[in-house]
Structures are given as structure tokens and as C-alpha cells.
Amino acid sequence: MEDPNSTSQLPLPSPFSGKAEVVKLPLRDRPSLALKNKVGKAQSKKPTSLWYAVYFPQLAELSESQQDEQLNVLAALLENISATVSFHPQALICEIRSSLKYFGGIEAIHNKLKGPLAEQLKQLALPEYFLYAACPTVTGSLLLARSGHNGLIYQQDNLRSALGQLSTNVLHLNKEQNRRLYNMGIRHLRDIWRLPTNDLYKRFGSDFINLLNRALNLAPEPTRNYVPPPAFSTTYDLPYEIDNLDRLLPVAGEMLEQLSEFLQRRDLCTSHLLFSLKHEKRSSTVINMSLRQPSRSSEHLLMLLGTHFSNLIIPAPVIAAKIKVKKFDAFMTHSESLLSEDKSATKQYSDSNLNQFMEQLKAKLGGHFVNSIKTIAEHCPEYATQQMTYEKMEKIEKPYKVGQELKKNPISPRPLFLLEKPEQLVLRNGKLYHRKSIEIISGPERIETYWWSGTDVRRDYYVAVEQNGSRLWIYRERSGEKNWYLHGYFA
């Protein structure tokens, strides 16, 4: 393969044709009419970066958020040829100088990208074409790609003369700036090189000057690099079959240690992972581990897995184990008090300890046997609460936002435990009895509702104390026989 640094300029192949499109660009530079008065010290002999730009004109019809979404999908393909992929308006740009020898030249890199990019554009329901170019600067390669020349410039010495031939349309200026350039008789970038920098700054501003300086490598170029979404999956093939899951715990502990290290390096945690047990000639046994609070503690995850193992009956011996993370979450740390006298208080109770206990309880009993009580906007006590599993609660719960009005608790006390069917009380000699005599201590609270449904609820509720000390929630009907009923117990 020919050394690219020995050639000042080469053409790139056309996007979807077998023949190469030869772009004639000048090999000599213009006189030193830079936008800056001084370029600086002589450049080092070390080869500069080579940036390969892929420009998608069809994305102009999409909104900014839609463009970002499509570019994220396309960026995953460019990651196969470069570790540095940056985002730009309707374009992706990656550094390929370090990859030329590995892939066998720029043409091999382009052929490697051409098919997957076209296929991905087809899946995204977008026209299957793109423009491309490469040069030593990020902005320069973007301008070349916008022009549609599909040109390649290896040496920075030829950058000014090559960019000078481009139309000013590649700058994507606003209407007012384009009108000013047209009235000044400027049609190409080489016409801008001849103008004084101070006058350009007064007429077009600093952003315009910085754009041209970045194209000529006279100013630093900040980039927004592509970061692929995290993914974790690991498999351990056992040297022999295991039918006792307790013997599998050391292997699972090593796999969870790998997961914990992966999450710590990326400052992440997880709230949903799958642990699969593979069998010979049987379908895999999958343990769905959904956490109430995201975690990356291998000890906590191993404890939950051991609890699942205690209730699991496998259909056949295990030959392999696999862990796959289904959901990643940002890691949120919890700060503790610096003062020693406060440390004893923080150990008594915390949301983290409660969540870990609930996760262990759910793993032991099963998700359908651990429920949460959800309040409902109903006046009638029988319908004011509802039992739901924690999985359903997590789906319907929404984070509290500033300015959102919180639901207020009723002023009158309400018991947590209600009887499934109210129990009628005995009224004897003007005194109420349950098991023992009852004394009313507060009330009444009047509730009248459901008159529209044919079941008219009209009650006066009281808080009472039984002789044995129990606190009761009782009511008296306001219609019919006006009997007394026990409806609930206070804790």
C-alpha cells in the first residue's frame, strides 16, 4: 500500500458507483493571506489527524431531536473504523489517520462503510445516499462533504487552496450574511481569504471568523463525541454439570464481581438484570431480578440471587450461567453525617435498608405476594385504598415536580386496617359493645356519597376506645335503622 503521507492529494471513490470520481484540486497553496496575521511556529513533522466526514443532506427535513436520534444510530456504524466519532449538524466525522494501515487505505474504509450506511438509511426510511470527504481538520472535511466533491486532502499545506474553490454556500450562513457576501461580490471561499480580518469581524462577527479559522487549523475545534450505550452480558461455561444450585453461588459471585466492576468504571448501577441457567437439551431457566432501588453491590445482588435459588426447582443440571443487564441507571450516592454523634442515628433507619429488605422479601415469597397500598381519590372508605404489586406501582408512580400540588391527607384520622365487611355493634342500655364496652372519644366525621349509584352512603364516623385499650373506627348510619358498625382498627 502506498504511504498516504507521500501523496499530497488523492480522490475518494464515489458513493455508489464502481468507478472512482476524480476531483481535481490544486496542489499549491495561495499566498499567505490568512485570516490571522501569524500562523505560529512551523508544524511538526508528525502526521496530523485525518478526519473523515459523512454528510446526510436528507436529515435537513427532520427536527433537531430527530436528527440527533438518527445520527446516534448511524454513529454506531462508524465506530467500527474509528474510536473517535463526533457529531455535527447533519454529519458524522471520525478520525481515520491511525486506521489507514490497518484497513488498507481510504478506499477500503469507504467500502467498509458504504453498504452498512446505505442499509441503515433504508431501515430508517431515509434516502439511501450520503456525501463524504476527508482532510486534516474537522470543519474542513465537513465543508468539503457539503460541497459534494467527495475529495481527499492528506496534507495540510494543500488545505487552503482546496477549500478556496468551494462555494460560500457550504458555510450554511443565515440569510442576512449570505446577502452581505453576495453584495460584496464574494462567491467562493478564496474571495474571503483576500479580505482583512478586522473588516470581516465587524461585518460578520466572531463566529464567522472562528468557523474559517477552524477549517484552516488556526483555531481549536471542540467536538461532541459519540458514546455508545452501555451493554453488559457475560457467560460462564461450567466444566461439569451442577444440579445443586448452592454450588453455583461461587461462580455467580465472580460474575457479579465483573458486573460490579463494569458499573463502577462507568459510574452506573442497574435495576433490572436477567440470570439465566442453561441446561442440556432443555430451555434455559431465567431468573428475572427487578430491584426497587438501583444497585451495583455484588454482595447485595448475590444475596438476592441466593434467595431466588432457595425457591427454584431446575428441570435439569446446569451446564452454563449467563448474566445480562436489561436496564442501566445513573449512580446516586448517599452522603453520611461527618459527626460521630449522628452516625448512630443514621444506622437505625434508611430508605436503602428498607428497599433491600423488600427486595429480599420479594425474592423469597414472589412478587405477587408483596403488595403496596395505594390511595385513591374516593370519599367512601371502602374504595379509598387499593392493593397493588410493586411492579405495577413503579410503572404508575411519577416523580414529584416543583409546583405540583401534593395530595393532602384527610384532617380526620383514618385507620390503616379496614374490615372487609363492617361488623354490627350491640347497643345495650345506651352503651355500645364489641367484645367489651366501647367509649367514643372523638367525632363525628360525616361522609355522604354514592347517591348517584343507587347505593346511598350516609354515615357519621367516630373514633372509639374499647375497654381492653383497642382504638376503633366506628360509624352510625344516618338513614334506615341507624345501626352502629365497626369499620376498622387503628394501629
Image: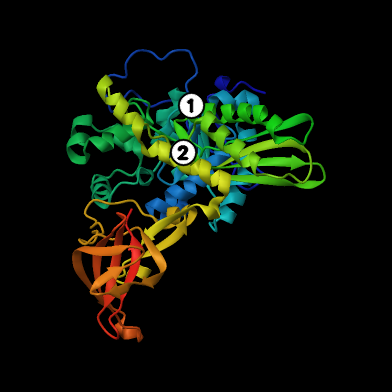
Mark number displayed over residue 356: 2
Is residue 353 visible to the viewer in this orientation of the structure?
Answer: yes
Q: In this image, 476 relative to 319: left or right?
A: left
Between discs 2 and 1, the one toward the N terminus = 1
Dot label at residue 265: 1
Callout 2 crowding tier (Cα within 10 Å): few <14, some 14–19, many ≥20: some
Q: Under tag 1, what secondary structure? A: helix
Q: Outermost residue toward the right?
A: 281
Q: Amino acid at mark 2?
A: Gln
Which residue sits at x=43%, y=39%? 87
Residue 377, image x, y percentages: 31, 67
336 up-or-down from 403: above or below = above
Query: Which residue is most to the left?
Result: 202
The amino acid pointed to by label 1 is Arg
User: Marks 2 and 1: which is nearer the front?
Assistant: 2
Callout 2: SS: helix
Residue drawn at (21%, 69%), measured in percent from left and top? 445
Picture disc at residue 274: none
In three-dimensional space, the C-alpha distance between marks 2 and 1, rounded to whole angstroms, equals 23 Å
**Residue lying furthest front:** 429
Q: Quadrant of residue 323?
A: top right
